[in-house]
Amino acid sequence: MKLINRKKALQNDSDRKSDSLEVRHFAEPKVAEDTSGNSGNVIAGSTLVYRSLVRPTVAFLTAFDDGSMTNGETWRLRSETTVIGRTAGDIVIPHDPDISGQHARINRREMDGEYVWGLTDLNSTNGTFMRIRRLVLRSGREFMLGGRRFTFSARSSISTRDQHREVNSPLQTRRQRLPNSREVVRLGPRLIDTSAASGHVEHLLTEQSCFIGRDAKRCRIHFAEDPFLDPVHAHIHLDERGRWVVEDHQSLNGLWLRTSHAPLDQDTMFLLGGQRFLFRLPGE
């Protein structure tokens, strides 16, 4: 009887060792090199790594660490709606006083059999800005260079709101008068620096082309003490259609447009308060 039990014990021990060896020697299939740059998606022999085909693709949102363009905290966006704010929302950035309580919302929706993403400002105090390379300017359009805010103005006529108060009826003739010097000075294309500590500073665009940056020798509009501007940060000029255009000059901290709603594509950067974000979609 003891001999039989001993044989069973040896057999069980041998089975356990055999199972252990099988697990220990199991090797995951080698991932083939993906020429598209999306490593990890393609298995040797063109076999795809399994994923569900009935649920939306998960997007990624990274909040950059201060002073970094690569490191930060990343979230996976699985919901149709993601709210970002300082005091409430799905992603909360509590230590940034320039972010509103509920600042912006990321939406995902299905369109023509595909999922598209968008970013919407929630009437925030300081606005939502998208990083872009080129911007056609219209009067009242607001943008940022580095961390400095500008508003473009292109007034070509004097407002008649005050003049209309002089008459009680549209049938009456307005008394003709000459515009005062203050009204005339406000005419013409200009950049209004709304982030200046001393108040709004206006830069009249008297030339068809000029640069903006830190270097006074190369830039007609310059800010020598601003560490977030490149020596030559942006180029503002009239295009062939007579429109004022501002273009990023391959700067580190970029050109940003204030927007109420914008699409989110691969590698889209946006700014809420003082926090920069990167939106990414997984590789195709």
Image (tube, rainbow, N blue to C red):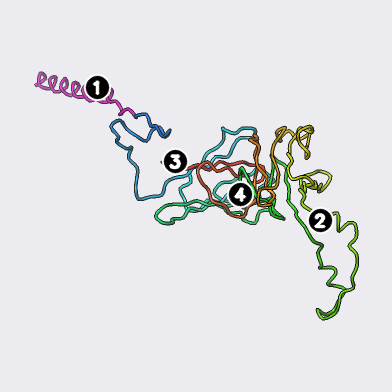
Quadrant assignment, res 138: bottom right
Residue where numbered disc 1 is placed: 21
Tag 3 residue: 282
Q: Which region is colored magenta? A: 1-30
Q: CA distance from mark 1 to mark 4?
A: 52 Å
Query: Quadrant location of residue 96?
Result: top right
**Between discs 1 and 3, the one toward the N terminus:** 1
Front label number (1 vs 2): 2
Viewer-nearest of labels 1 and 4? 4
Distance, label 1 to label 3, CA atoms, is 37 Å
Give the number of the mark in front: 2 or 3: 2
User: Does the stretch in magenta take in 248?
Assistant: no
Give the numbered dot on residue 187.
2
> Secondary structure beneath disc 1?
helix
- Pointer 2 or 3: first along the chain: 2
Residue 210 image position (x, y, % from top left): 74, 41
Most frequent secondary structure within the magenta stretch = helix
Q: Are marks 1 and 3 in contact (CB under 8 Å)?
A: no
